[in-house]
């Protein structure tokens, strides 16, 4: 009767190899010890004495075996780690703890790139047998693209990633996407929410970087993710590499942020001296002189606002902006900027009408950043209004939110401008020539509001 030969599993390789290695090690140690004893005996270095001969043989065997065992353990560490990594990425059930590429042993043995490659290739593995020619053709096409496709399981582990995908191995040896999401709007948080609540869902992210600013080979992506419960590919993530488009803007912002950081100190000093001078000269100024001081104060405050916008935009892009949410009222936030806004309106010959009720629900927000948003929006409305125009600041309850409206009667904007309104550094051709600005105010305002959970 013919016997059935079972295929050896990947997880059995290391134990089998180690067992064979031990047997060979013992045989070779005994053999070498025997040969040495024979040579010593034939050379008359030792005399024939059965007991002494056996004792010498055993001593030599133990010495040879110990030395070989020491060398054996040192030399086979890399092979053991490679075997564990291959076992981990196989589709066989196993309890192997995968070696981490950044561990001390992996770095010392030079195994880190090999482990990374194994894990990356493992992410591209198709469980369930051979691929059809059609599947193979599609996979090759995905691997050749600069953009990438990633498929994740319900628990968020990567099961397929095209070659261009930014992936890494976490401390537990699992394959994960290497992307710099904000804490408040991450892919993991969205995936956890939709897998619990939805059958199908989609979401887009823009300008998501693979690494922090300054890291070599940093890439920036636009991302589209879709989810379908119960599917063989629950999470499908498309990553469009937009580095060539976004990186010049980031480089530009880095330079401007450096300059803004250097300017912040002098501008603060200027504002301080203006306040001191105004207090010292109060009562001795003519209306024209007071108006001049007011214009200087508005210009200094506006410059300070530009600097704050630039620095916050830089922090936001680098995922370093911290927003401390506390319970507060919209009215109390407006009070922080009230005097400055009224002064700006007066200097520009605009009227500012404020309608913020005292009994509005409180909101979860950061007073400093929310006041920056309100200041940006009101300042924009003032700048784009006609001479003598009215800018209305209104807050009202809307479902479970508080809605803030900044309404002006200004020049308006064409529909083709609206789509780009919140892009970094975007300014329409008409406004660029007639109205001063940095092109960052609305970008950072949108980022702050979304970070607070608003729209």
Image: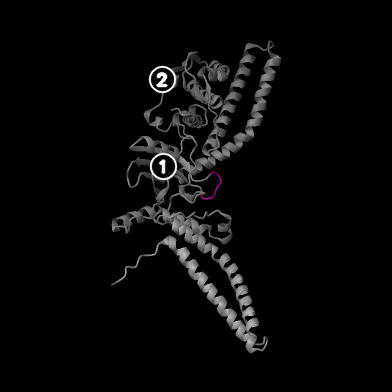
For marks 2 and 1, give the one nearer the viewer. Answer: 2
Q: Does the magenta run of residues contain 31?
A: no
Residue 454: percent from left, percent from top: 45, 27
Picture residue at 47% right of the left edge, 67% below the top: 17
Check if mark 2's residue and mark 1's residue have beta carbons within 8 Å: no
In the rendered view, tell whether residue 42 sits above or below residue 317.
Answer: below
Q: How is the image coloured?
A: one colour
- Residue most extreme to the top: 283
Vertical arrangement, residue 364 with respect to residue 116, above or below: above
Mark 2, other Cα within 10 Å: few <14 / some 14–19 / many ≥20: few
**Disc number for residue 398:** 2
Mark 1 crowdedness (10 Å alpha carbons): few <14, some 14-19, many ≥20: some
Rendered-image quadrant of the N terminus: bottom left
**In this orientation, which residue lies closer to the viewer: 159 or 439?**
159
The residue positioned farthest toward the right in the image shown: 280
Q: Quadrant of residue 279?
A: top right
Residue at (42% x, 49% y) in the render: 158
Under circle 2, the secondary element is: strand
Along the line of sight, which residue is nearer the eye, 400 or 309? 400
Q: Is residue 205 above or below residue 396?
A: below
Task: Give residue 184's position: percent from left, percent from top.
Answer: 48, 34
Q: Which residue is mark 1?
A: 223
Q: Earlier in the sequence, mark 2 or mark 1?
A: 1
Query: Is residue 282 toward the left or the right of residue 367 in the image?
Result: right
Span of residues in magenta: 212-217
Q: Which mark is residue 411?
A: none
Residue 153 in the image: state x and y as whole percent: 39, 46
Q: Position of residue 198 (x, y in %)?
A: 35, 35
Residue at position x 63%, y 32% from top? 263
User: Distance of mark 2 from mark 1, alpha carbons?
Assistant: 31 Å
Query: Visible in this render: residue 344?
Result: no
């Amino acid at each position: 009767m013919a016997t059935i030969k079972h295929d050896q599993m990947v997880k059995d390789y290391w134990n089998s190899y180690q067992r064979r290695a031990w047997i060979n090690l013992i045989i070779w140690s005994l053999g070498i010890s025997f040969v040495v004893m024979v040579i010593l005996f034939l050379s008359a270095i030792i005399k024939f004495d059965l007991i002494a001969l056996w004792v010498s043989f055993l001593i030599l065997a133990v010495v040879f075996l110990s030395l070989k065992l020491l060398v054996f353990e040192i030399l086979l560490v890399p092979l053991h780690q490679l075997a564990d990594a291959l076992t981990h990425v196989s589709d066989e059930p196993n309890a192997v703890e995968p070696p981490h590429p950044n561990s001390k042993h992996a770095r010392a043995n030079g195994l880190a790139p090999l482990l990374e490659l194994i894990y990356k290739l493992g992410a591209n593995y198709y469980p369930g047998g051979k691929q059809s020619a059609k599947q193979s053709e599609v996979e090759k096409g995905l691997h050749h693209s600069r953009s990438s496709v990633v498929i994740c399981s319900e628990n968020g582990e990567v099961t397929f990633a095209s070659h261009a995908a930014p992936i890494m191995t976490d401390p537990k040896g699992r394959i994960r996407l290497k992307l710099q999401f904000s804490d408040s709007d991450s892919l993991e948080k969205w995936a956890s929410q939709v897998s619990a609540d939805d059958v199908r869902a989609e979401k887009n992210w823009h300008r998501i970087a693979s690494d922090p600013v300054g890291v070599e080979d940093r890439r920036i992506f636009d991302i589209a993710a879709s989810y379908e419960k119960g599917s063989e590919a629950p999470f499908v993530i498309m990553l469009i590499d937009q580095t060539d488009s976004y990186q010049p803007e980031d480089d530009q912002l880095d330079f401007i942020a450096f300059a803004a950081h250097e300017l912040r100190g002098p501008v603060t000093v200027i504002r301080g001296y203006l306040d001191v001078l105004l207090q010292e000269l109060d009562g001795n100024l003519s209306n024209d002189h007071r108006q001049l001081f007011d214009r200087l104060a508005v210009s200094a405050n506006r410059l300070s606002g530009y600097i704050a916008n630039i620095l916050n935009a830089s922090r936001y892009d680098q995922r370093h902006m911290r927003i401390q949410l506390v319970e507060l009222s919209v009215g109390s936030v407006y009070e922080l900027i009230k005097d400055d806004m009224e002064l700006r309106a007066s200097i520009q010959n605009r009227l500012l009408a404020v309608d913020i009720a005292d009994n509005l629900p409180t909101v979860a927000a950061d007073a400093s950043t929310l006041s920056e948003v309100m200041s940006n929006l009101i300042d924009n409305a003032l700048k784009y209004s006609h001479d003598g125009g009215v800018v209305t600041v209104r807050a009202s309850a809307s479902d479970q939110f508080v809605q803030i409206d900044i309404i002006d009667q200004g020049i308006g904007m064409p529909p083709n401008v609206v789509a780009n309104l919140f892009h970094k550094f975007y300014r329409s051709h008409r406004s660029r020539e007639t109205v001063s600005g940095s092109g960052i105010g609305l970008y950072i305002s949108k980022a702050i509001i979304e970070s607070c959970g608003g729209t």
